[in-house]
Image: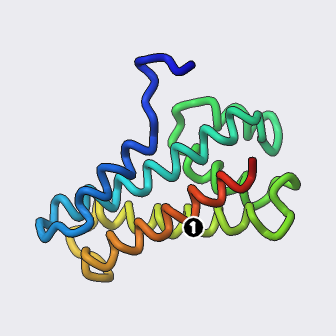
Amino acid sequence: MKNQNEFEWLEFTDLGMEYLNETNRAKQRTGISRFYYGAFCSSGDFLNENKTYLDEKSEKIMTSKNVDVHRETSKIFKNHPKFKKENKGKIISKNLNKLRKMRNQADYDKTTEKPLSKMINESKRISDIILDSLKNLN
């Protein structure tokens, strides 16, 4: 049973969905960011719930609020032996990195490499790949 104060990260992706057809640039940027955080936080929770780390340092990073948790999450999926079969971990890692790059552009850059309408749709597609991949790991 879930604690009523526990947040479900997929609510971020739900919010991203609300902004898919928006023309407002701030909402498009917010949607891109929400797709990233829904997928990233779900990925981190998966690793922590399954106590899947590379070593003690990796565990310390993953159980902290340190900014390195973004990089470490991707690194674990890429390098942990548990995820080597069919390159499942590499797929998650690669897509987390792509999504984070778009999120960083949306959150911090005045201009973006691609139109925001394309970026938000691509963010949704990549987020879906990550979330589906996590389901298939169980």
Horizontal and vertical percent for residue 6? 46, 23
Q: Residue at x 64, y 49 (%)?
A: 73
Q: Is residue 127 left or right of residue 46?
A: left
Name the residue beneath numbered marker 1.
95
Q: Is residue 53 left or right of residue 8?
A: right
User: Residue at left 30%, top 50%?
Assistant: 15
Q: Residue furthest bottom?
A: 114
134 or 83: nearer the viewer: 134
Given the current orientation, which residue lies at the most extreme left position?
A: 24
Q: Looking at numbered disc 1 in the image, what kind of residue is underneath it?
A: Asn
**Residue 111, quarter of picture:** bottom left
Q: 43 or 80: which is nearer to us? A: 43
Quadrant position of the N terminus in the picture: top right
* Figure quadrant of residue 102: bottom left
What residue is rendered at 56% in x and 56% in y?
Answer: 131
Residue 65 % position (x, y): 52, 32
Q: Give x and y (percent) for residue 17.
A: 31, 58
Give the percent coordinates (x, y) of residue 78.
74, 61
Mark 1, other Cα within 10 Å: few <14 / some 14–19 / many ≥20: many
Residue 78 vs residue 46, the one in the foreground: 46
Pick the residue in front: 54 or 118.
118
Q: Is residue 18 above or below residue 53?
A: below
Q: Residue at x 65, y 60 (%)?
A: 133
Q: Secondary structure at mark 1?
A: helix
Q: Is residue 118 left or right of residue 97?
A: left
